[in-house]
Amino acid sequence: MAKLEIITLPDPLLRTHSSAIEQVDDELRKLIDDMLETMYDAPGIGLAAVQVAVPKRLLVVDVAGAEDEPAPIAMINPEIIKLGDEMRVYEEGCLSLPDVLVDVERPKTVSVRYVDREGKQQQVEADGLLATAIQHEMDHLDGKLIIDFLSRLKRDMVVRRFKKQARGL
Ligand code: GNR
Ligand code: NI
């Protein structure tokens, strides 16, 4: 396994639409394992492939607590098939936006269809932190970030801060 580099704002790749995966093969399984290692090392509860500079429709999540057994899930070409009616607000962070926290309101429950690492179709009904994490990761696949839930003014302030940092000031 190998730890990968996580890209951060203002890397334009974070704003691209990731492409569907055509083949579930050993190379993809290696990427999944490397993404899981990178996520656990960060540490984080989810990671989208685009965050390691691979703009493909792949995400990993693990919302198990530190005391629990690891519960890694890899989703290939995930699709939301149902969003719950009830909403909840959760303070989200993002490994591609260090030190930024945003209150994000999302549906409390979500049903997702995806292909697993063996190439098999799967479906899950998620709620709580898993539902939040899956929606956060799926946003990454469409180039969406948590700062998009802020007002234009606040979003621009965050973007400016990261651009300035990237210039080395
Ligand atoms: O590690 C992460 N924590 C987190 C907390 C609340 C809501 C979403 C997340 S996902 C984030 C890792 C990340 O940036 N994934 O894209
Ligand atoms: Ni993120």
Image (tube, helix red, strand yellow):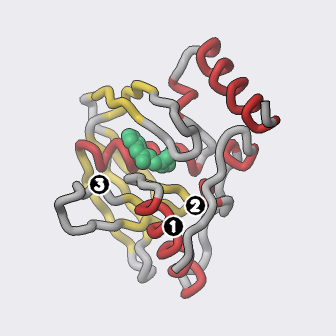
On-image quarter of the C terminus: top right
Residue under label 1, please give it. Answer: 35
Instruction: Using the image, determine if residue 147 lies above or below residue 25.
Output: above
Mark 3 CB lies closer than 8 A to ligand 1: no
Instruction: Return the disc, 2 or 1, that comes first in the chain's sequence.
Output: 1
Which structural element holds mark 2? helix
Q: Give the crowd class for mark 1: few <14, some 14-19, many >=20 residues within 10 Å.
A: many
Tag 2–tag 1 contact (CB < 8 Å): yes
Residue under the point 39% across and 78% down = 120
Inter-mark Cα distance, 2 to 3:
17 Å
Marks 1/3 in contact by CB < 8 Å: the verdict is no
Name the residue carrying label 3: 63
Name which residue type carries label 3: Val
Please name whichever residue, 135 or 68, is drawn nearer the observer in this view of the structure: 68
* CA–CA distance in space, label 1 to label 3: 15 Å
The residue wearing badge 2 is 49
Residue with the most extreme top position: 153
Find numbered disc 3 in the image and state the secondary structure of the residue it sits on.
Answer: loop
Q: Residue at x 30, y 50 (%)?
A: 130
The answer to whether marks 2 and 3 mark residues whose Cβ atoms lie closer than 8 Å is no
Task: State the residue at coordinates (50%, 64%).
Answer: 38
Q: Is residue 135 visible?
A: no
Amino acid on which the number 2 mark rests in the picture: Ala
Q: Is residue 122 left or right of residue 165?
A: left
**Judging from the image, what secondary structure is the residue with disc 1 in?**
helix
Q: Amino acid at mark 1?
A: Met
